Structures are given as structure tokens and as C-alpha cells.
Image (cartoon, helix red, strand yellow):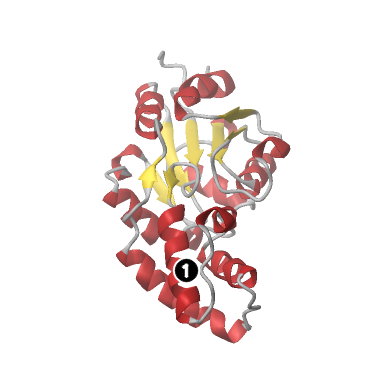
Amino acid sequence: MSSSLAGATLAFDLDGTLVDTAPDLVGTLNVLLKEEGLQPLPLEEARPYIGRGARWLIERGFTASGWDLPASKIGGLFDRFIDHYLAHIADESRPFPGVREALEAVRGAGARTVVCTNKRTDLSRVLLDALSMSQLFDAIVGADVVPAIKPDPRHLIAAVDEAGGNVARALMVGDAATDAGAARAAGAPLVLVSFGYTEIPPAELAPDALIDHFDELPEVAERLLGA
């Protein structure tokens, strides 16, 4: 690739975009459901519930299993979820095909890369460290260190700033409505993957590009952000 991405920043969602984390996240949810006497959820049923953070996954998962959680229970379940998930964060989670190569290609072309995720920053770092991926990013910006989380544009803007970029020359790569909302509100181009975690089909979110494999990303990034 040429150096036409010099000065550009690519912001990436994490769960369902960079890494297939559903087996470990849904596995942790199912541990809680079983401990509460409820039926575990099939992976494919619970997969779309990922992307808005652990609390949403817990609430949505328990509702799907037939129990509307009282607010007083959520805090304790959340703490138990995090404890179990941290111990099993990369048992089965793996980067999607072509992710490493695409990141290396756009970085080699001069782009900055940053993780912009509704996952907590500490959990994101532990996961990326376990997968030997942290070195592929200039910054990792989770839900706990921003004024408001995606789909609020301030999350994307803060992530790009943290990576040393400018949102005027940045794009968002994601899989769901939270990513689409943040990109649109920030005035940034939107790239969605077709294989992520979403309750709305990604094509219906009208991305500037919809990719089926990460080997498409470098060319798409050049088209949308190239000098």
C-alpha cells in the first residue's frame, strides 16, 4: 500500500468486529443463568445481545430466559459476571480472519489505529494482551474513560484524540447500531462488518462500506480516507 493513509485514524469496535468474543461472553452469561436456576441460551440466540456492555448482556439474557431482573439484582450479577469472565476471557475468543494482517497493512500505510469499545478498558486490555494484539493499537478506549459511550459521538472523538488523530480524518469500523450512531453523529465514514453482533442487519444501517472479510479493509480505508 502507498502512504496515503498517513495522518488518518481507524477506530475499531472490539466485540464482534475485531474479535469473536461471543463464546466466552455467552458462556459467562450461561454460568449465571444456570446458577439462578434458568435455562442457558444457545450461542446464536444470545450473540446479537453483545455490544452494549456486560450489564445490557445480562439484562437482555435474563429477559430472554424468562426472568425480568429486579434492579436490586443487577449489581451483584454484574460483579459475578466480571469475575468469571476475567478468568475465561480468551478461552475461546479469537480475532476474526484477516484482522492482524489488515491492522498491520493500514498501520504500515501510515494510519493510526484505536479500539473504541463499550467494553471496559481493563477488560479490553486483558483480552487483547491475551491474544497478543495490544501492540497493533495506538490506544484502547473503553466505556469507563469517556464522557458517554457509543452511540454518543464523544466516545469516538475521545478515542481518536487519545490515538493522536483528528476525527475529521477518521473512520469507524464496527458491527452494530452503536457504531453507526457514533460515526454518523461525529461526521466520520462508517465501515461495518457483515459477521458481527447486531440485532439490526448491518446493511440496514447504511454504512459507507460493508465488508465480509478484513482483507477488504485496507482498500476501503484508502478509498474513504486516502489523501
- Residue 32 pos. (x, y %): 46, 75
Residue at image position (62%, 82%) is 71
Pick the residue in front: 203 or 119.
203
212 relative to 56, above or below: above
> What residue would you read off at disc 1?
30
Q: Can I make out residue 78 in this image?
A: no
2 to 73, vertically: above or below: above
Disc 1 is placed on an element classified as helix
| 86 left or right of 203 in image | left
Q: Residue at x 35, y 52 (%)?
A: 92
Which residue corresponds to the image point at 54% horizontal and 29% vertical from the top-left?
Answer: 212
- The percent position of residue 49, horizontal first and vertical second, equals 59, 58
Question: Which image quadrant for residue 61?
Answer: bottom right
Question: Which residue is more in the foreground, 108 or 157?
Answer: 108
Residue 35 quadrant: bottom left
Q: Position of residue 116 (x, y in %)?
A: 49, 47
Where is residue 181 shown, x and y percent of the image?
Answer: 67, 46
Q: Is residue 18 visible?
A: yes
Q: Quadrant of the N terminus?
A: top left
- Three-letter amino acid code of the residue under disc 1: Asn
Q: Nearer the viewer, residue 69 or 23?
A: 23
Quadrant in which residue 52 is drawn: bottom right
* Mark 1 crowd level (few <14, some 14–19, many ≥20, 10 Å Cα): many
Q: Nearer the viewer, residue 190 or 17?
A: 17
